[in-house]
Amino acid sequence: MDKKLSISIGSLLMFFGLFVFPLSYTGTGTFFNIAELLLCLTCCYITGSVVLAPAKISNFLLSVSNAGFSIFVGALLFSLLVFISVNPFFLIGALTLVTASLAFIFRASIHYSLKVSFPSIFAFFVTLLVFSLISTFDFLQQSSAGITKYGFPFIDPYYFTSIVTSIRTGTIFSASYEVGSPINYQCLGFLPPALFADILKISSHQALWGLAQPFYKFLAILLCYDVSYFFVKDKLSSTNYFFIFLCLTLPLLLAPLRPVYILTGNVNRFVYSGVLYLLPSGFISHSAENSLVWPIINATWPISIVLSLSCLLLFFKSDWKNKRITADKLYFTLFMSLLIIAKVPMFGSFVLFVGAIMLKRVVVNRERLMNYFPYCFFAMLVAGELMHVCMGQSSTGHIYIDFWHFKDAFTSLPLVLGFRNTNGLIHIIKFLVVLILSYCAWISIRWLGLMAAVKSDNSILKELLVGSFVSILGTSCLAAVLHLASTGIDGKVNPDPNNDLMQFVGGSFYMLTIVSSIGLLYFLYSSIGSFMKKSVIVFTAICTALSLAFLIYAFIYCADARKIDCMQYSWYQENVDELKTGKYNDGLIVVNPHLSYYGIMLAASDYGKYWSAMDKSKLNFNGTNKNAYRWALFQNLLGSPDVKYLIQMKSEGVKYIFATPADSAKIAGISTLFPQQLDRDTKWIYRLK
């Protein structure tokens, strides 16, 4: 451990304010849970700092970044306690006991300070600006289950919320939305919100979308400065405020330019499909219809970006030529392993990225293979075991080799371009030319930063280039020949265009963006006084201003676009009030959720266990055969009422049917047909006798 481990109380209070705002915004903050929140964040900060101390990572981070990353690590560690007990008194007691013990043991090494450096304050508020501009939906998403006129009728927010609910009950092997089936998803990002939800006694929905998601995104943006400064630190001082501003806003500047959106004046789609997947909000969406949706509702990219940036920093600060086992190398290995249960595409992209650099060092620099092999082997071993536990359960998802993208492109692209001859060598050449030009346009002005890295005499920047290009090439080839598929209960394959491997390419593009940012910054600060530098600074300032103008427009557009009238609000409130009484916790619940009624499940998943919750056709690869069977059984009951369907439900533990306004008449008719089997309990709730 360092001789002095600094704990910045001022930085802690900054993050405390970041967490308190959502609670105040939604009216869920009370004096007691705000006090518990402060205690929880303090415990996470101190514990995370002590755990990270051997790696001396605080020496390379701003005090505010170090506070955020320590809270992140501490929250991950303490969230494992929910698998022991979900009792909030136990959790608070355990956090306090562990933290007090560590603080006492290392009391001579810990230095507490109220002072926060001006660069930290500046970085925090610039990050807050960027975060606010790209996270409009977050402020609404956390309230979508409970505030009139704000609705998010998508299945994914419910699906992600229900994962938090499942974890906060102490298991990942029985999903709350489908009792008896495993979560079967990348669960790392859902562990801290489960801890927050239990300690603060708030809904899983609020904990995920109001606390954890904004924190992950904020930290990911903030770490961009620390990673960039690490590679350019010999060119400037840490108090260069313009440099801090550039580090935090360059990802906006380096957005890919999609010419079709610019030419058609589709500004909002250009912004959200062009910018947000590069930031911690989402990923590449090749579907135009989904470009406004997927970057917002995806819940696993932000935490994976935090881990990948920390891995990047740890990898390059480690002395790999030294055979000695160090904390840097161990934490790098562990964090890279955790990437696989944070976001599999980011794991694949980062493995290719760092693997290419290792191979270059072994082949070109003549370093020993054994300097890297044990850590890589251990990382893959741990990642495999984590994958087996968290995603190795029985489900309908399958991976098979299929030239899906190539086949689709070779049959449709020539027609789109106006080519009538779709056969032979000419077609192949035209296709490859268009493909190459598309990638050049997609990379956009990142070329400027990449070329700057090529022209530099810095060997580390050249390694970053090697890693990013290998990652792009490898994931592009992977996405070209592999396609994921799911099968229904009839055994037929359900094709899903969102189910390809373009997300892997998205992860690679994010790494390419970071490398390009570093290259551009290195060029700017290594050519002091040159005309070229002044020109680039002016160009950067203009482009950044334009990007911010686009984002301000998008902020206003989206703030108004999601104001929709949730007609189901009163229905939702009545049923949640009933669920809160606890009268319906002694059996499984059946719900028929039309898209307009997902709100009931977003919050009610904290109060009930659902036998059937989602339409299999909407679940795609996240579903299971069990869910498909249950959904089909319920639809059969509604379409062709028969007592055998009710008997089958009872045999599987179903005790309640919640009617929605969309199917209330049908269920009322069924209760009239079979009064010995089904009885009305409240206006919307029926009890199976």
Image (spheres, helix red, strand yellow):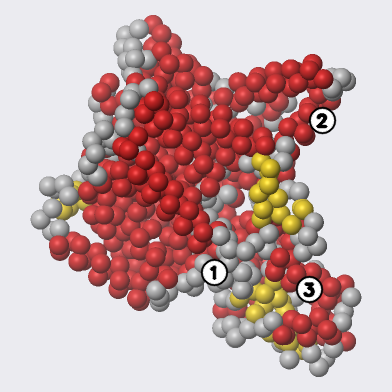
In this rendered view, identify the residue nearer to me: 544 or 334.
334
Query: Label 2 amino acid?
Result: Thr
Residue that sits furthest to the top in the current view: 531
Image check: 134 left or right of 452? Answer: right
Tell me if residue 290 comes above or below residue 48 in the rendering: above
Q: x, y (%) of residue 558?
A: 62, 43
Query: Label 3 amino acid?
Result: Phe
Query: Label 1 amino acid?
Result: Phe
Alpha carbons under labels 1 and 3: distance apart: 24 Å
Res 279 seen here: no
Q: x, y (%) of residue 30?
A: 41, 68
What residue is pinned by disc 3? Answer: 634
Which residue is depicted at the point 35% across and 72% down?
91
Secondary structure beneath label 2: helix
In this rendered view, identify the residue nearer to me: 589 or 326.
326
Res 16 seen here: yes
How many numbered markers are drawn? 3
Tell me if residue 417 comes above or below residue 672 in the rendering: above
In this rendered view, identify the residue nearer to me: 372 or 232.
372
Q: Are marks 1 and 3 in contact (CB under 8 Å)?
A: no
Image check: 349 left or right of 327? Answer: right
Secondary structure beneath label 1: loop
Tell me if residue 50 comes above or below residue 528 in the rendering: below
What residue is pinned by disc 1? Answer: 173
Which residue is depicted at the point 28% across and 61% down?
43
What residue is pinned by disc 2? Answer: 411
Image check: 531 left or right of 340? Answer: left
Q: Are marks 1 and 2 in contact (CB under 8 Å)?
A: no
Residue that sits furthest to the left in the current view: 108
1 or 3: tag closer to the N-terminus: 1
